[in-house]
Amino acid sequence: MSAATPELKKVTTHSVQAMKDKGEKIAMLTAYDFSMAKILDAAGIDILLVGDSASNVMAGHETTLPITLDQMIYHAQSVVRAVKRAMVVVDLPFGSYQSNPELALSSAIRVMKESGAHAIKLEGGAEVEKSIKRILNAGIPVMGHLGLTPQSIYKFGTYSVRAKEDAEAQKLKDDSKLLDQLGCFAMVLEKIPAQLAREVSESIDIPTIGIGAGPHCDGQVLVTQDMLGITKDFKPRFLRRYLELYDAIGNATQQYVNEVKAKSFPTDAESY
Ligand code: KIV
């Protein structure tokens, strides 16, 4: 490799742990397709999450429940093909790990084998302990996910902040310790009070990655289409929009339509 193209150091479970240990925040975004993953990776994102939010964002479903393992693997393959540096983590979708540890392991193996991703993520604590152990025993890195776990939306009833009451906060603390002890390499904390996320982040060794969980997590994650302003009407308090792409894309499309109708596109210079 020439001096002009320095070798990219790939992000691994070890490097994300090292980031926590030296106080460097971890930046994670979702990705579901090749083109977007290529841009995010080249821009220096540490972790790309092939989230089951693809069910909402890419397929237009109301919840994350309908997306299938085959569909997750398709998205993951597209993302993996684009990435040079980032670590690629793939959500195990609803129904692919909850019922028994053997099913969980075979789902995780399919993701790793068929997509070439680097780790899987699944939702829950003590309820999925056996599945997590089984997957970890096969040498597959696991990212946990506590707090608002969207695959349980019909149990919660709403997408509001979780663990505001003592009992739920205590269970979350216990679950975070369990995930750490089991050997998960990181965990997402979604939509919980900032103070609770701080306590959890300070009391466990592995990194926490927050979404709507305040500034004290070891990293942050957002859904890319939300932070780029493509999902126009989704405006929770935790979301910072870095672009307003819904309007920008709409305006560009209107201009294209007008120019095609006006016969000003294409010109001779744009023709063969
Ligand atoms: O599926 C997803 O996008 C997620 C993030 C919100 C963490 O799980």
Image (cartoon, helix red, strand yellow):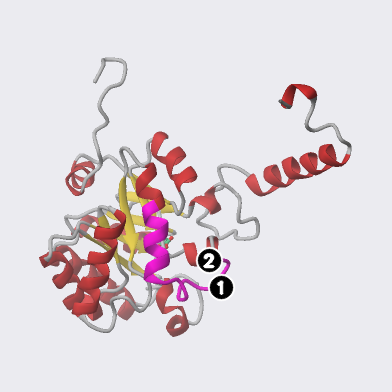
Using the rendered view, name the quadrant where residue 133 is placed. bottom left
Residue holding disc 1: 62
Three-letter code for the amino acid on which mark 2 is drawn: Asn
Residue 42: tell me if it is visible: yes
Dot 2 or dot 1, earlier in sequence: 2
Q: Which residues are drawn in magenta?
A: 59-77
Mark 2 in CB contact with mark 1 (< 8 angstroms): yes
Query: Which image quadrant shows ligand 1?
Result: bottom left
Give the number of marks.
2
Residue at horizontal 79 percent and vertical 26 percent from the top = 267
Report if residue 196 lies within the magenta region.
no
Residue holding disc 2: 56
Q: Secondary structure at mark 2?
A: helix
- Whether the residue carrying mark 2 lies under 8 Å from ligand 1 is answered with no
Three-letter code for the amino acid on which mark 1 is drawn: Glu
Residue 190: tell me if it is visible: no
Using the rendered view, name the quadrant where residue 104 is placed. bottom left
Report if residue 60 lies within the magenta region.
yes
Q: Secondary structure at mark 1?
A: loop
Q: Find residue 51 and name its label.
A: none
Residue at horizontal 19 percent and vertical 47 percent from the top = 17
Mark 2 surroundings: few (<14), some (14-19) or many (≥20) residues within 10 A: some
Q: Position of residue 116 (x, y in %)?
A: 27, 53
Mark 1 surroundings: few (<14), some (14-19) or many (≥20) residues within 10 A: few
Q: Is residue 16 above or below residue 98?
A: above
Quadrant (top left, top right, bottom left, bottom right) of the N terminus: top left
Residue furthest toward the right? 262
Quadrant (top left, top right, bottom left, bottom right) of the C terminus: top right
Using the rendered view, name the quadrant where residue 257 is placed. top right
Of 25 and 55, the residue lying toward us? 55
Distance CA(mark 2)–CA(mark 1): 6 Å
